[in-house]
């Protein structure tokens, strides 16, 4: 894989990013994955507590910037700026993963709204969890700068 196209950052900037829990090598923050982990947590409860399907159905997709604008993340402006300055190829891989997760979650939500039985909703929840959890892990790898090749392989299948 070719090296990133963005120039290296200086140590002061790297320290600022690290202090804000933003990976200085990638410019991405794992805090965004909390948005997807919330949906997963709700889906995991559906098989045992069918009423949690309604809670999942209130989940709405948020872009990286929207997530940080809506959060109490102390360095939200820095997180958004670092994302915008991230290597375009890395960011494209990351965005592709998050778009895939969002598509799955939205499709499952649509199917759950149409489902008539709790058992059907539970099955949908279990399937969605099985699909989205590995994608969250891949996205975490991208954020941490360790999974770009894995993402390309996984998304090409």
Image (cartoon, rainbow, N blue to C red):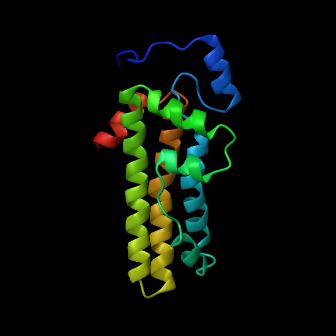
Q: Residue at x 55, y 50 (%)?
A: 67
The residue sitting at 38% across, 51% down in the picture is: 100
Quadrant that contains the C terminus = top left
Query: For the image shown, how many numbered marks are present on the structure?
Result: 0
Q: Which residue is found at the position 49% from the left and 33% from the top? A: 83
Residue 6 against residue 134 in the figure, above or below: above
The N terminus lies in which quarter of the figure?
A: top left
Residue nearest the viewer, comparing 54 with 1: 54
In the rendered image, residue 115, in percent from the top left (x then y), is placed at 41, 83
| Residue 4 vs residue 157, the one in the foreground | 4
Residue 146 spot, x, y in % from top left: 50, 27
Image quadrant in which you'd find residue 49: bottom right
Image x and y of residue 113, in percent: 43, 80
Measured along the vertical axis of the image, is residue 153 above or below residue 4?
A: below
From this view, report whether residue 127 is shown above or below residue 32: below
* Residue 102 in the image, given as x and y percentages of width and height: 42, 56
Classify 36 as above or below 109: above
Q: Residue at x 44, y 62 (%)?
A: 105
Kindly indicate the quadrant of the structure image that contains residue 149: top left
């Amino acid at each position: 894989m070719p090296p990133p196209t963005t120039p290296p950052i200086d140590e002061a900037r790297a320290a600022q990013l690290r202090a804000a829990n933003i990976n200085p090598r990638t410019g991405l923050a794992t805090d965004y994955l909390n948005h997807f982990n919330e949906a997963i947590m709700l889906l995991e409860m559906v098989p045992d507590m069918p009423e949690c399907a309604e809670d999942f159905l209130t989940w709405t997709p948020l872009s990286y910037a929207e997530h940080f604008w809506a959060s109490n993340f102390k360095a939200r402006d820095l997180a958004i700026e670092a994302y915008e300055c991230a290597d375009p190829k890395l960011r494209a891989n990351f965005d592709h993963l998050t778009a895939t997760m969002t598509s799955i979650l939205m499709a499952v939500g649509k199917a759950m709204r149409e489902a008539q039985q709790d058992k059907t909703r539970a099955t949908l929840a279990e399937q969605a969890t099985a699909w989205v959890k590995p994608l969250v892990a891949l996205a975490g790898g991208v954020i941490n700068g360790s999974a770009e090749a894995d993402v390309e392989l996984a998304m090409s299948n």
